Image: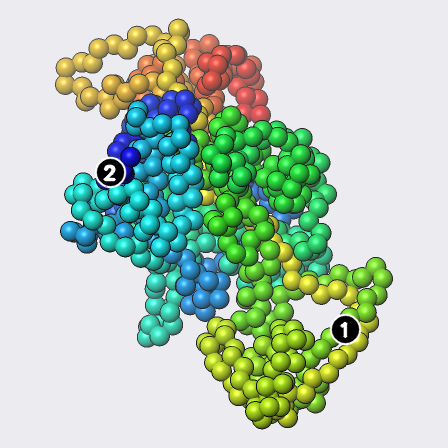
Amino acid sequence: RPHQAVAPVAAMPITASSGSAAFAKARPDLDGLIKRRFFYRQAFEIYGGVAGFYTYGPPGAAVKQNLLALWRKHFVIEENLMEVDDTNIMPHDVLFTSGHVERFNDFIVKDSSDANRFWRADKLLEEVMEAKMADKACTPEQKVEYQKVHAQADAYSAEQLSQVFAQYGIKAPESGAELTPPEEFNLMFATPIGPSGMIQGYLRPETAQGIFLNFKFCLEQNNYAMPFGIAQVGKAFRNEIAPRSGLIRQREFTQAEIEYFVHPQKKAHPKFAAVGSLQLELLPSPQQLAAQPAVRMSLAEAVAAGTVANETLGFFIGRTYQFLVRAGCKAEHIRFRQHLPDEMAHYACDCWDAEIEMSLGWVECVGIADRSAYDLTVHAKATNTPLIAEEPFEVPVKVERYGLSKKAAAALGKSFKKDAKRVAGKLDEMSAEELKALKATAEAEGKASLTVSDCGGSDTFEIANELLVFEATTTIMHVEKYTPNVIEPSFGIDRILTAIYEHTYSVRAKEGDAPEEPPPKKGDKKDSTADAKPGVLAFPPEVAPYKCVVLPLDMRIVRECEYAGMRDALRATLSEQGLQYKVDESGASIGKRYARSDELGIPFAITIDEDCLKQFKADAASATATLRERDSTRQVRLALSTIAQ
């Protein structure tokens, strides 16, 4: 039947399941808790806010920093990585060489009747496909068709997007007007550097480039040993066309990236056996193209079958899974999706995304890619700096080479002066067949043209025949020089935080030991939490913003003269143990204060009661307090002097 114009409607993504539906149902209550307790809010809110920017409040900032500390412990420390801290602003040449200036684009479409209304083309297409699949009239055959289009949405070219939009009659949402043809929109924030503004710079779109630029110096600090990894944590900036969904798509966000450098032919990993038995949900590209579900297999099976390209890539997939679970994501809501062939960068060997199921469906939160040697190669070429590693051959190797003679190379330098390195570098890259063809042209015409394209621009040089003297040489090599390949796990910290909030959130029935709240007195200020559901954020202790809360049973305890000294001694002990904590001495009931700490995800509560005070008066060392555990609400009595330990 003919396709009709469809505008996106509010519907669960096609990748959603009963799990994501449950998260979506709880999301309004969770949003209320997050805003009320100031985990995060829209930045510049009192000025009306700007889309794509968020401010983390005290508990949210603590959760984020604890997550980053856990990431460093899990990867930097446990995998013995190096760490760098590079700049947020990068000059044009760096990002031109990396390809970001020309290719870091999304496609934008606009409402033809109102140029101020625009959408990211692939996301609009995904929403239309989701709406079509949510239609009760959608047949199984149509669903498979729509799933395939949905899976390839961000891999389409501008021409393909135009064809698909026309095929499905996709119009501008709300107005129903025609959409403009897809156009490329560069996502980088440009900024001039220096008072004159003559140096063009950009806010970095990723943290990875700072690692590649410092590979040479880190290799030196690693005593030239290979393989090895470098990590960086920091801000990245992308001028998103349509930022939305809270922390999921921001214009300023936090990345944690690893570049693990390996020999191109040696991608086995010595610790792969430690993760090889992990059973994971994998969605290889053939399954996606056939609209088939994910498969469950061990990483060892996936690598052996060639589904995952190599052990090092598989190792970081496994370690990523372990980190996400350790951080508070539910294992049954984590899967790994392989990039489609036309979705993958041309230089990449294999790429997988760790996707976490949440209220929006399956959301990409970590990218794990074998980037081959692309980045080091282009930066080395642009700067004429060797970004290579060396390893001794077990047996010396005979290498035959065809290139410029030494005498011709010297003459080339005199003739081309400042451009000699560029010309010689281009000749050095050419194969024997290409050099012989160039020589043949020079002999026939007396000269030959050579085009050199690099960060210095694209220039054509005329080279006289007498300068093109080539020779074949044979060399015995004792040391192999090579450009390392890189395996890159890239973590979107804010997206992972969104998943942690959703996966750890629940609503609890009132505890049996919590007394009923007295009715408010006339003139009392209304409690902002009075109508809120008793939410609980069951953060793992490593991630929780505070490890414990100190609670006097009621205000009578606070008024006792011994209480302040006992509380201060406990606070000192907690601080000595490096434990983040809160003290709640408000007049609310103990049940209300337990609920407050549960909302903040605090795993333990230390309650000081009359017995504790009496014991402290008699013998401070014998004093005991109640320790309550958040998830079970179980309470035990422990010595106050050792409760922090």
Where is residue 303 shown, x and y percent of the image?
A: 66, 39
In-front residue for pair 103/182: 182
The label shown at residue 342 is none
Does residue 339 appear anywhere in the picture?
yes
Quadrant where the N terminus sits is top left
Residue at (29% x, 42% y) in the render: 168
Q: What residue type is labelled 1?
A: Glu
The mark found on residue 400 in the picture is 1
Which residue is identified by label 2? 4
Q: Is mark 2 on a helix, strand or loop?
A: loop
Q: Quadrant of residue 171?
A: top left
Left or right: 475 in relation to 440: right
Q: How crowded is mark 1: few (under 14 residues within 10 Å), some or many (20 or more)?
A: few
- Please determine whether, in this image, residue 251 is positioned above or below residue 221: above
Q: Position of residue 349 (x, y in %)?
A: 59, 51
Q: Tell us which disc is closer to us: 2 or 1.
A: 2
